[in-house]
Amino acid sequence: MKQYLQFLEHILNVGIKKEDRTQTGTISTFGYQMRFDLNQGFPLLTTKKVYLKAIIHELLWFISGSTNIKYLVDHDVRIWNEWPYERFKKSDEYQGETLDEFVRKVKEDNEFASKHGELGPVYGYQWRHFEGQDKFVDQLAWVIEEIKQNPNSRRLIVNSWQAASINEMALPPCHLLFQFYVLNNKLSCQLYQRSADAFLGVPFNIASYALLTMMVAHICNLELGEFIHTIGDAHIYLNHLDQVHLQLSREPRALPKMKFLRKVTDINDFKYEDFLLEDYHPHSRIKGEVSV
């Protein structure tokens, strides 16, 4: 994963200090691209341990079309908890609950979860229910069928940026558009990400979209090509600088391998138990606070 370390170095070398919505402060630069040959191994960081369980469950949650954090909470995945909690704190029902107490209520009280675990029409909704005039489009299902029937198409695109719905979302999509490409029976995917938290978010994004590409290739009986990650605002939060320098001091190790344990023919049929990661030997985890 030298590509990722070079990405961090690029931000440090050419980025400038910039204020941001969270008021944490960043070092930011605009425009960067990384390329990963998926035949060289699964691009999961080795310079720190990455929580693969959360990546897989979040991706399955996206694919399901769900926009409520209860599925994630029930599987002990915490990466989305802060955003509905901040919304809950502004409601009339808030009585000083901590984040942990809020999450416990989501887990134990279905009615509470239904009301306060919602994020609005975020990623999964847009992938599976992109709304147009008097109809909606299941973009993911359409693009998979198009790959099977018309692999040379230049329209193999899924778009999460539904401008009319942005104000309804707890967090507008950061990784907002991806395009598939088939050549010589190999499937590649390019992601455009408008905003990239380099330390916390990008490792998840790389692994998630690489895995999605593998899943689509699997059900379409294609070989693997590249995952290409194109980024707009690439930033390191000021409270992550020590963690970034620690990561840059570590030597990358060999990439692991991702396997599917059974043949799956429908994107909706993948289960958490279908994925097997082999030969993952990362450096120790490095913690950092998420800016909301």
Image (tube, helix red, strand yellow):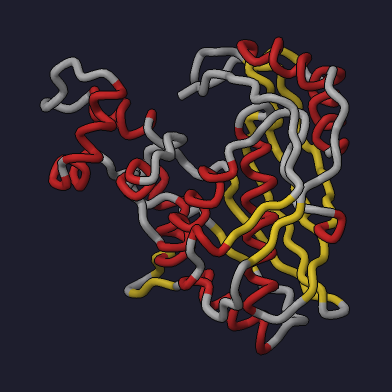
What is the x, y in percent for residue 112?
16, 40
The quarter of the rendered structure image containing the C terminus is top left
Q: Residue at x 83, y 39 (%)?
A: 1
Q: Residue at x 88, y 79 (%)?
A: 184
Task: Indicate whether 108 appears above or below 9.
Answer: below
What is the x, y in percent for residue 159?
56, 59
Furthest residue in direction bottom, as rendered: 149
Task: Indicate whether 140 appears above or below 13.
Answer: below
Asked whether, in this view, residue 118 is left or right of residue 4, the answer is left
Q: Is residue 194 visible?
A: yes
Asked whether, in this view, residue 13 is left or right of residue 285, the answer is right
Asked whether, in this view, residue 113 is left or right of residue 205, the answer is left
Q: Decide which of 172, 97 is in the foreground and name it.
A: 97
Q: Is residue 168 visible?
A: no
Q: Decide which of 36, 265 is in the foreground and name it.
A: 265
Q: Residue at x 65, y 57 (%)?
A: 211
The answer to which image quadrant residue 264 occupies is bottom right
What is the x, y in percent for residue 45?
74, 37
Task: Indicate whether 252 appears above or below 38.
Answer: above
